[in-house]
Amino acid sequence: MSDILIQRTGATGILTINRPDKLNALSGASADALADALDELQNDEALRVIILTGNGRAFSSGFDLSLEEGNSGVPDLAAVLRDHFNPLILAIRACPKPIIAAVNGVAAGAGVGLVLAADVVLMAEGATLNQPFANIGLVPAAGNSWFLTQALGRHRAGQLMMTGGKISAQQAIAWGLSSQASPSASVLEDALKLAETMASKSETSLRLSKALLSAAEAAALRAQLERETGAQAEAGASPEWLAATEKFRRS
């Protein structure tokens, strides 16, 4: 079974993270598969808009912390970010076609980075954006520190990041992280309706509007991803993270 499902409906492409048994957590390989699928859709001339969503009750719980069988070590978090998640975040921002995140359930950690990298965010009424990093001795990465600070300001972002908090769909709207809350059963349907409206507009206008949204932030985002990676490398050697990893392996 593929970790990433690709569908096409009219002028809209749909990318679905398909690891429901793992709450759609992404391994390095599945993050790469998502980047490859995104590349396929952005080069499909029949498509105008792309939707990113998850299968089951989660959008994505972020990086898959489960280790491969027989591997008794600890994940090299800096390498995971640098080789897999940072390129994926940059690819979402660089994609010339608008991307709608249809957040069908919980998004956590790096999964929030995927949501906030999109151009438009629709959330199911019960969905949340979770920042669990502080709870396990890590720091926000995969663009979280950048996107949250840009959207919320330093003080709100700081409180969220340093308490391991989460944001409801309604709070996300109030704070400018989402534009719409939908009943859980209809968030993808609502995203498709929005995509249809967007796809009816000029292709040139869509492409240039996306480029304008991305241009001012591109260099700063790339630099912040590198800062996050360095900080995560240090946090990934902390006793708190090593203890959390051991607890996770034994659960």
Image (tube, rainbow, N blue to C red):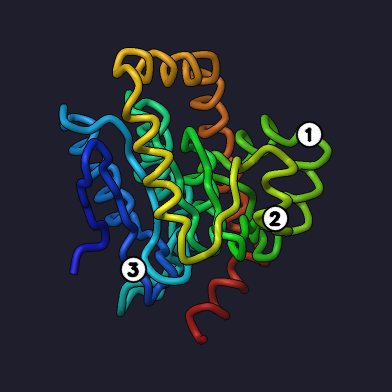
Residue 31 screen position, x and y as percent:
33, 51
Give the crowd class for mark 1: few <14, some 14-19, many >=20 residues within 10 Å: few
Comparing 81 with 163, the one in front is 163
Q: Is residue 164 left or right of residue 33?
A: right
What residue does disc 2 label? Answer: 167
Residue at the disc numbered 3: 19
Closer to the chain start, of discs 3 and 2, is: 3
Q: Looking at this view, is 68 or 206 the one in front?
A: 206
Disc 3, SS = loop
Identify the residue at image location x=61%, y=55%. Answer: 129
Q: Quadrant of residue 197?
A: top left
Left or right, 29 with respect to 121, comes to: left
Asked whether the viewer can see residue 30, the reply is yes
Q: Residue 162's x, y, as percent?
A: 77, 52
Q: 33 or 128, which lies in front? A: 128
The amino acid at mark 2 is Ile
> Circle 1 sits on which residue?
154
Q: Residues within 10 Å of mark 2 (few under 14, many from 20)?
A: some
* Whole-number angstrom distance, CA of label 2 to CA of label 1: 16 Å
Quarter holding the N terminus is: bottom left
Question: How many numbered discs sit on the rendered protein?
Answer: 3
Between disc 2 and disc 1, whose residue precedes? 1
Residue drawn at x 26%, y 62% as measured from the top left:
3
Q: Please indicate whether residue 178 sits to the left or right of residue 203 in the image.
A: right
Question: Looking at this view, is 101 or 158 the one in front?
Answer: 101
Whichever of labels 1 and 3 marks the residue nearer the N terminus, that label is 3
Distance from disc 1 to disc 3, alpha carbons, whole Å, reads 34 Å
Q: Identify the residue at horizontal 47%, vertical 45% (top origin).
A: 114
Q: Is residue 181 above or below residue 73?
A: above
- Percent x, y for residue 149? 70, 34
